[in-house]
Amino acid sequence: MTDTDAIPRIPTGINGFDQIALGGLPAGRSTLVAGTTGSGKTLFAIEFLARGVQNHGDPGVFVTFEEDPDAIRTNVASLGFPIAEWEATGKWTFVDASADIAMEASTIGAFDLGALTVRIAHAVRRIGARRVALDSLGAVFGNLNGFGSLRHELFRIVSALDLLGVTTVITSERPEEYNSVSRLGVEEFVLDNVIILRNVLRAERRRRTVEIIKFRGTSHRTGEWLFTISPREGIVIMPLAFLRPRERASTERVSSGNRDLDAMCGGGFFRDSIVLLTGPTGTGKTLTSLFFAAAAVRAGERCLLQTFDETREQLARNAASWGLDLDAMEGSGLLRIVSEYPEVASPEDHFLRIRRVIEEFGPSRVAIDTLSALERIVSSRALLDFVIALGAVLRHHEITTLLTSAPTGRVTPTVTPAIAMEVASLTDVTILLRYVETGGEIQRGIAVLQTRGSAHDHSIRRFEIDNTGMHIGDPMRGLSSVLGTVDPAAPGGLAQPSPQAGGERPGERDVRRPDGDADG
């Protein structure tokens, strides 16, 4: 252990934060948590205390300068924190300074920090507290003027807390998301540890991130980390909250729902596989998802089918055209369909909903159609975090998963799918669907680009779609550049050709499908 790692940590218990902090907050020190309105400062402080009581039996003192204790008790009830019960058993106590601040500021213009420090010390000793939270500094120091006096008074209260041997979280407002760290401009210089919570508006949507600016004398992870706030789970930092080491890799095979595709993949998918199926509109992505779900029902397994592109009614109509009865499958209790458009929630909230269904429904299989729809509302980094977190949950539960995506361009793929580029390295099986024109006829081709831990068919095969499903045929002999030119950066080393790249030959080129062809 190095000197910088010798400082003991106290776990916060906040979902994913201790992974960023490499174990938790430095013990016996004060940490500044700064953020703008709605960034989650108060919730961070509350969770730090509440998780300490829940997980470690650490008593805590919450010092409130603005919110009434009754409001705090009510606001966190959905998280399952029985604060009133903890107060009765001596695990939690409030120091309510909100009324004192309002009265003293209006009469003498300043708040008596000496009296406040005495009250906090008394509360700490009375219940044997190990954790303290102060929310927030702006209310205490708002009437003080001058950098020197602000710094002196802040140092005074922080020193008193450190002498008590408690680990403290102190919240403070920020005037903007970037540039300055705090509103008063002195907090970050006095405190040993600084954390920033952001609530940035980008592309008309809010995106919360957390960043550790400094842990004096010890190490931590750097950069901004995406998080969301769940009414049931509190702060959830993605994807770190869900990454767990895999204890084993399954060798059991399950069917894709298509015997020919199973054969191309070496006998089916491994039980814990994550499969990425990518192709333009109408090549059979939704069809494959439906037959994948039907195979689960036939095997007596539960399957979650999440669709971002179609309504439940559209999906049932399409399934019926291929002889599949979704109503009957749902009625059996083995199929759960969740249909919602990406725009109704953030990707983080979509993830939490999917995870909640997985935990409640307990599926053996999951199909998500399509990831590309989420690209309408999210950056590539946030979408990658979504997939990493989802993959961690799926692998932990050993769930066979089918993810679909579409390339840029509705039919003729001119750019390798952005999400496929990012996700391919995280998946176990990558399957590519493609349109090809040969002899004046539009044909479909399928190729298995990778199957981790298994041999697979390396040929590009023709396939057809009719009212009974997908039928995979013979290899497409005598053709070249069907799937694109070689590009090491693309999934499996294959990229989609650009119009400038050439690759067109008489009787062998990419075409747009005629309008009106049903989307598969």
Image (cartoon, rainbow, N blue to C red):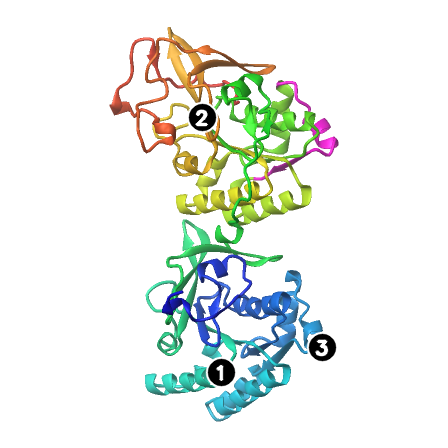
Estimate the x, y position of residue 385 in percent, counting from the top left.
45, 47
Side (left or right) of 478 relative to 340: left
| Residue drawn at (37%, 79%) of the image | 190
Instruction: Please give the label number shown on residue 88.
Output: 3
Question: Helix or strand or loop: what does disc 2 sit on?
Answer: loop
In the rendered image, the residue lying farthest to the bottom is 108
Q: Please report whichever mark, 3 or 2, sits nearer to the chain's N-terminal start.
A: 3
Is residue 135 in view from this perspective? no
In the image, 463 versus 268, the foreground residue is: 268
What residue would you read off at disc 2? 279
- Given the image, on which type of amino acid does mark 2 rest? Gly
Question: Helix or strand or loop: what does disc 3 sit on?
Answer: helix
| Residue drawn at (50%, 67%) of the image | 41
In the image, 366 versus 76, the foreground residue is: 366
Q: Please report whichever mark, 3 or 1, sits nearer to the chain's N-terminal start.
A: 3
**Label 1 CA crowd tier, 10 Å (few <14, some 14–19, many 20+):** many
Estimate the x, y position of residue 127 in percent, counting from the top left.
63, 81
Q: Please report whichever mark, 2 or 1, sits nearer to the chain's N-terminal start.
A: 1
Side (left or right) of 211 relative to 78: left
Q: Nearer the viewer, mark 3 or mark 2?
A: 3
What residue would you read off at disc 1? 161
Marks 2 & 1, CB-CB < 8 Å contact: no
| Residue drawn at (38%, 7%) of the image | 440
Question: Helix or strand or loop: what does disc 1 sit on?
Answer: helix
Residue 337 falls inside the magenta stretch: yes
Marks 3 & 1, CB-CB < 8 Å contact: no
Is residue 365 in view from this perspective? yes
In the image, 151 versus 428, the foreground residue is: 428
Q: CA distance from mark 3 to mark 1?
A: 24 Å
- Given the image, on which type of amino acid does mark 1 rest? Leu
Q: Which residues make up the magenta segment?
A: 322-340
